Amino acid sequence: MKKIATTATLCVSFMFTFAQGNSTLIRRDTVLLKSSECNWLVSNNKKQTVSESILHAIEIGKLKAIDPNSGKIIPANKISTWTIPIDTVLVQNEKTGKMEEVLVQGKIIPSRISEIKMEQDWYLDATSGKIVAKVKWIEPRIEVYNAGESFIGYKTFCHIDYP
């Protein structure tokens, strides 16, 4: 009896949707994509990878990156060094010959952002009869290595919401 009631409710819902000319949410899912398999999505003349395109879009302010741990927006001008530790090294001053401490910080290696986690909603457009996907958010995931440079997994680099 419960199955019949559920089926009837879905049928009425779809009929109402078709009558109203609206879209109906069919499914929400989360997928994990390999960045290297998504490069065809990027249409640009610079031949950037999808990871490079995401970082560039954040740098120029087209996308807002959110720190996955604090929930705060990552400043666009700091995205290329986000989560990269700063180290102190001794460097010889060419003029004085004295050793001086200098702060050094590396940059994100885009090729190490090799996974993208994405949540999307799938809708049935009642007017056209087409199924349409809308991306809700993405999370570029960066490779993590131990001190011996052995791969140990992935961590979320940032979170990006799509309106």
Image: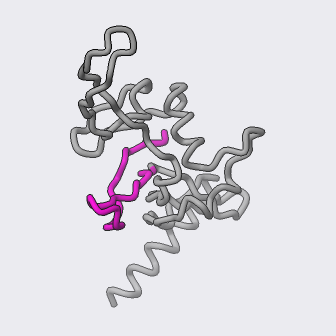
**Vertical relation: 14 (above or below) 104:** below
**In the rendered view, does 75 fall on the left or right side of 120?**
left
Question: Is residue 160 on the magenta stretch?
Answer: yes
Residue 139: horizontal and vertical position, in percent? 41, 51
Single out the residue that lies furthest toward the bottom. Answer: 1
**Vertical relation: 15 (above or below) 137:** below
Q: Nearer the viewer, residue 29 or 43?
A: 43
Identify the residue shown where x is 60% and y is 49%: 50
The magenta segment: 138-163
Identify the residue shown where x is 48% and y is 46%: 109
Residue 156: horizontal and vertical position, in percent? 34, 53
What colour-coding does the image apply?
A: one colour
**In the rendered view, does 118 fall on the left or right side of 53?**
left
Residue 67: horizontal and vertical position, in percent? 30, 39
Question: Is residue 99 on the magenta stretch?
Answer: no
Count of numbered circles on the image: 0
**In the rendered view, does 34 fall on the left or right side of 86?**
right
Single out the residue that lies furthest toward the right. Answer: 45
**Vertical relation: 27 (above or below) 20:** below
Q: Nearer the viewer, residue 79 or 101?
A: 101
Identify the residue shown where x is 56% and y is 60%: 123
Q: Nearer the viewer, residue 101 or 81?
A: 101
**Vertical relation: 31 (above or below) 62:** below
Single out the residue that lies furthest toward the front. Answer: 97
Quadrant occupied by the N terminus? bottom left
Quadrant of residue 28 in the image? Answer: bottom left
Quadrant of residue 43 in the image? Answer: top right
Secondary structure mainly formed by the magenta segment: strand
Quadrant of residue 124 in the image? Answer: bottom right
